[in-house]
Image (tube, helix red, strand yellow):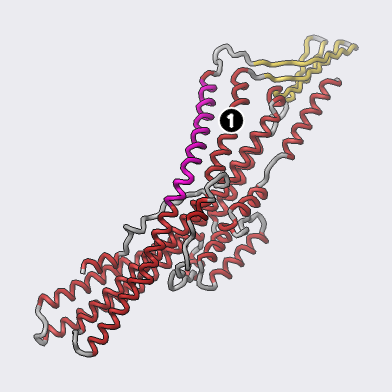
Amino acid sequence: MRRPLQIAAIALAAAFLAGCASVGIDDALKQTNSSASQFTGGKLELSRTTEQRDARTALSEALLGKPLSRDDAVRLALANSPSVQALIAQSWADIAAANQTSRLTNPVFSFERLRLGDELEVGRLLSFGLVDLILLPQRLSISRSQAAQAQVQLSGAVVDQVTQVRQAWVRAVAAGQSLQYAEQVKESAEASAELARRMQLVGNFSKLQRARQQVFYADATTQLASARHNATAAREELVRALGLDDAQAARLKLPARLPDLPKSPREASEVATTAGEQRLDVQQARAQLDVAGKSQGINLLSTFIDVEAGVRRDTVFDGGSRDTRRGFELDIRLPLFDWGSAQRDALNAQALAAANRYDATVRGATSQLREGYSAYRTAYDIARHYRDEIVPLRQTMQDENVLRYNGMLIGVFELLAEARDQITSVNNAINAQQQFWLADAALAASVIGKPVAASSPMTSSSPQAASGAAH
């Protein structure tokens, strides 16, 4: 029995080492909080106890008690959103599945009892996969690579979630600002339409002149309705991203305006230095390549042969005598019908695909950064141009027209038209500022390796701007 005991001891030791090499969800959360700290603030956690859930609820209530800033929106989503907790739990499942790869298949115990006349035979067999035991070191290596891949996937999912929250917050605040100005446009149009009606009644306005003012009022009313819906839709998008229930959504308060532009944009050289192996997409592709390469060797062997080794002990009772037989068994699968060629082709193809995906990811990383930075810098320049040039000029024109109106050089309709043009310029400035903060969030995600598509700042325009251009 010495050799079977030695084999059993080796199997137990191997199973123990596999358990020690496992990666847990706490390790993955720590890694994510470290590698994506600018997105999580080190606050990402999985709530598994009542105390943790109560702490999350208390934090959510505190954040909802004041106007929600962009950073507080991220904190609220991490603390309150069930979607965030769901993706962490899914990562836990993925890591557990990766750890399962390193586990040996449980041994099989077989028991036989046969009787022939006065003869009784009792057979016992303990068997396990010999190939699995031999390949255990390779299985451990694959398990670690799969766990690393699951960790990178968790980081990428969190970056995506936080980026969605940041952009949803920008859209919601900008939509609120646009709604305010749409209301001003509507009030101005309503006043001019009413004045035109009264002037026509006393014979100072033609029917055509009144119709022009009335159609502008009708268009302004339509634009206000669209702006109200856009504000509601943007707010509800943010509510969903934050994971708020109905009671929490009713308490949600947002700032009246977007943050000011930064004094200076990020430099291209600063962004370019991040294009390297620390990017999440590169890490993900490399982890997939490692898993495919390591799995290929093990699976290629399993397509040729599979061996089950067992230790047997049989006892025969015949009358008053008792005989014991000891030995071992080997069960070998014979490749008579399937030589595994199709499986080996699939494994080779998967490894080749993983290698090419890695090369494509590395080559595309810097290109994505350049595109993201171009959108960011263009949006910054446009928003700053509106802030420093167009809006101040419109304000100067408005002030001068007020003076001309007071001097009776222009009429009230010319003054109202100038006011409408100024409001249109402000709406365009709000839209440009919105595009900048959307591009800023997209660039931050692209820098870490999770590119986000952003609308072009050159082609986006607000409904109010389009309406103003038409008039």
Secondary structure mostly taken by the magenta-highlighted segment of the chain: helix
Q: Amino acid at mark 1?
A: Gly
Left or right: 225 in relation to 78: left
The residue sitting at 27% across, 83% down in the picture is 400
For residue 329, above or below residue 388? above
Left or right: 405 in relation to 177: left
Q: Secondary structure at mark 1?
A: helix
Image location of residue 254, percent across then percent down = 47, 70
Magenta segment boundaries in residue numbering: 342-371
For residue 219, above or below residue 292? below
Q: Which one is nearer the viewer's eye here, 22 or 112?
A: 22
Q: Which residue is mark 1?
A: 293
Q: Which one is nearer the viewer's eye here, 338 or 387?
A: 387
Q: Residue furthest right?
A: 320
Report the quarter where the N terminus lies.
top right
The residue sitting at 56% across, 69% down in the picture is 63
